[in-house]
Amino acid sequence: MDQKATYQIFVIILLLSHITQAERRNLGLLEGLVKFVQEGTRHFQEEPQDAATVLPEYDFIIVGAGSAGSVVANRLSRNPDWNVLLIEAGRPENYVMDIPIMATFFQFSDANWKYKMEPSSTVCLGMENRQCTCPRGKVVGGSSVVNFMIYTRGNKRDYNNWEKLGNSGWGYKDVLPYFLEIEEMTIPELTKDTRFHSTRGEVTISYAPFHTPLADAFVEGGRELGHRIVDYNGETQTGFSLLQTTKRNGTRWSASRAFLHPMRDRNNFHLKKRSQVTKILIDPSTKTAYGVEFVQNKKKYVVRAKKEVILSAGAVNSPQLLMLSGVGPKQHLTALNIPVIEDLSVGYNLMDHPGSLGLTFTVNQSVGLILNEMLNDGSSLVEYLNYHKGPFSVPAGCEGIAFIDTKNPSDVDGDPDLEILFFGASLLSEKSLYKTLGIREDIYKTVYEPVEDTHSWSGVPLTLKPKSRGRIMLKSANPFHKPLIYYDLFEDPQDLEMQLLGIKKIIDLSNTKAFQKYGSKVHNYPIPDCKHLEFGSDEYWRCVIRHLAVGIWHLSGTCKMGPISDQSSVVDERLRVYGINRLRVIDASIMPVVPAAHTNVPSMMLGAKGADMVIQDWKTGYLKN
Ligand SMILES: Cc1cc2nc3c(=O)[nH]c(=O)nc-3n(C[C@H](O)[C@H](O)[C@H](O)COP(=O)(O)OP(=O)(O)OC[C@H]3O[C@@H](n4cnc5c(N)ncnc54)[C@H](O)[C@@H]3O)c2cc1C
Ligand SMILES: *[C@@H]1O[C@H](CO)[C@@H](O)[C@H](O)[C@H]1NC(C)=O
Ligand SMILES: *[C@@H]1O[C@H](CO)[C@@H](O)[C@H](O)[C@H]1NC(C)=O
């Protein structure tokens, strides 16, 4: 049986096993399933196929079909005179991965690289072996297929700061046109704001077609606390809102669905799947990249690039590949017997947004999302299968978002340093999620399992301007060994204090009238390792933060963009790797400072802007054949 069928059947059996026979007959479940399987088959056929042959040479070779790489491939192959090879290590996307409520399920599958941070003595203490997991999409569409579908661009000052750091052409006025170029806004009241929204791009943005009454309480509670209700992707960012998501008609709109499906018939474009690039070929005498080596099905291929190799393998794998190919910190590479071609600060400057996951509140009415309940009462599933509506259309239970400038809370045009994510469910009570996160079973059993079937909500504070930095290193010169991820999320204590501030803000929210209507109460079962501290004291929360904060999957910065005068930069403002000809990095790893945003659409923006630079450079003859 082929992979797509096994996946769908697995999920369908899983869902059906919860529904009684009588319900199955009543509800139109069969019709829904037939419809879903038909849509899934169409979805499968629309993904560009694995190229049957590989040419010896292409104009451009792009490594990684993720958020950024998919856009780059789309834009470069618009020119029929250029042929483009896109190489992806992962499997095809599957339609079940696009069911929003199941957003996190596929981290178990081969669609995830399954990285972990190195064990720490200061953070991730509530995780097995004190290691936070670092999920990364290994699938056509990359991390946009395993993410939470949250759509944010960041604050204008984030990009103006990139420019201030010496990267000309990266101010907000320069990046906004690319955000607009790729956006298809479908929220009616937002489409009117044509300065900040567009309806002509590929990335479809919508609210979930369903939200819980608790999500309304979240927005209303924010208002009670003096915050505005805001379109946080509009002119100003600070305030509360329902979540804008990368979804079309209630299903995930991944980078692949947006950018690769429409180009499946371009005959100057080849996609290779399940093909892992193991090395960028660089001539050490001319320091020019001329191709890549990749492995598919244990078979090795060598392909040449006539014009450029473009790395879009993401913030873990792009630095890994550079280092494997001799571009990176000299001392580190020498220690691994990798001949050094260019000594650069590859792998440093690792950033993420820390977020504490454990903060849970119970309510006294049936207003939250409970997965068991949704599965037992088949009507939600039927509603989703037939109409793409209802609770299944909520990405992993995430429904609301707030951006706060803690230094100037009343500034309408603030510069947010704290985000709050709202989930209409007890996040860590979800079995599959606590397992994928690697949370210790004793913590789950004593704290979160007891409220598994209780209506609840969770708030996650995000430190938006992290000062701590991590580092990616090679474990060995073997490209199939996972790289090492070192990251003390709270190396700088301010990053932890921002979490504490966020937790207090979320407790304030719970105390608003909007939430008290539902008898919202902090779930006060202490984390076993912290129960010697007074529940609710600052010390208690700091302990919880060190146990249950994770990097919220916005890994970035490891091939930093910067001026030549900045020793820590790896690429220049046109994303060209310093010292190496015909090699660029276009993905989240070039971010000099992570924006106050979830990084999916910002990475797509980088893809569109980066591709434009490639096109300009070859048109003006800046680079000659
Ligand atoms: C669990 C999770 C939840 C998230 N939630 C959100 C969210 O809700 N909203 C949001 O905006 N952001 C979210 N993010 C972050 C966001 O998805 C990423 O920042 C973004 O997708 C990164 O884009 P990228 O192009 O840099 O890398 P990716 O999208 O990860 O793409 C890299 C691609 O390169 C491939 N690749 C890597 N190495 C090789 C190799 N050697 N050979 C061939 N191919 C290779 C990978 O398989 C992958 O497909 C989340 C991320 C995760 C993991
Ligand atoms: C959305 O999906 C449902 C379920 O397949 C379908 O019936 C409906 O026509 C779709 N709506 C749009 C606007 O495509
Ligand atoms: C829930 O709690 C609130 C606040 O205590 C109370 O006003 C309300 O009546 C309660 N509702 C139910 C259904 O118990």
Image (cartoon, rainbow, N blue to C red):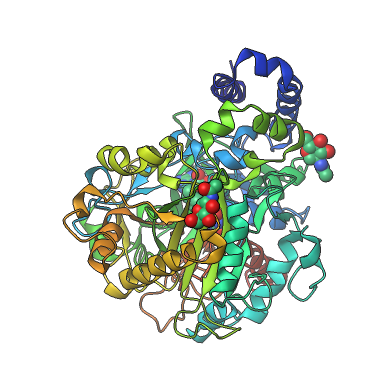
The residue positioned farthest toward the left in the image shown: 532
Q: Is residue 519 visible?
A: no
Looking at the image, which is closer to me, 619 or 395? 395
Looking at the image, which is closer to me, 29 or 446? 446
Q: Position of residue 133 (x, y in %)?
A: 36, 47
Which corner quadrant of the image does residue 303 belong to? top right
Q: Position of residue 446 (x, y in %)?
A: 28, 40
> Residue drawn 67% across and 70% down?
231
Q: Quadrant of the image for the C terminus?
A: bottom right
Q: Is residue 340 visible?
A: yes
Looking at the image, which is closer to me, 319 or 331? 319
Q: Position of residue 400 (x, y in %)?
A: 58, 59
Q: Please give left or right for residue 147 compared with residue 99 in the image.
A: left
313 vs 139: above or below: below
Q: Quadrant of the image for the N terminus?
A: top right
> Residue drawn 70% across and 23% down?
33
Looking at the image, which is closer to me, 413 or 376? 376
478 vs 165: above or below: above
Q: Please give left or right for residue 243 compared with residue 77 in the image.
A: left
23 vs 104: above or below: above
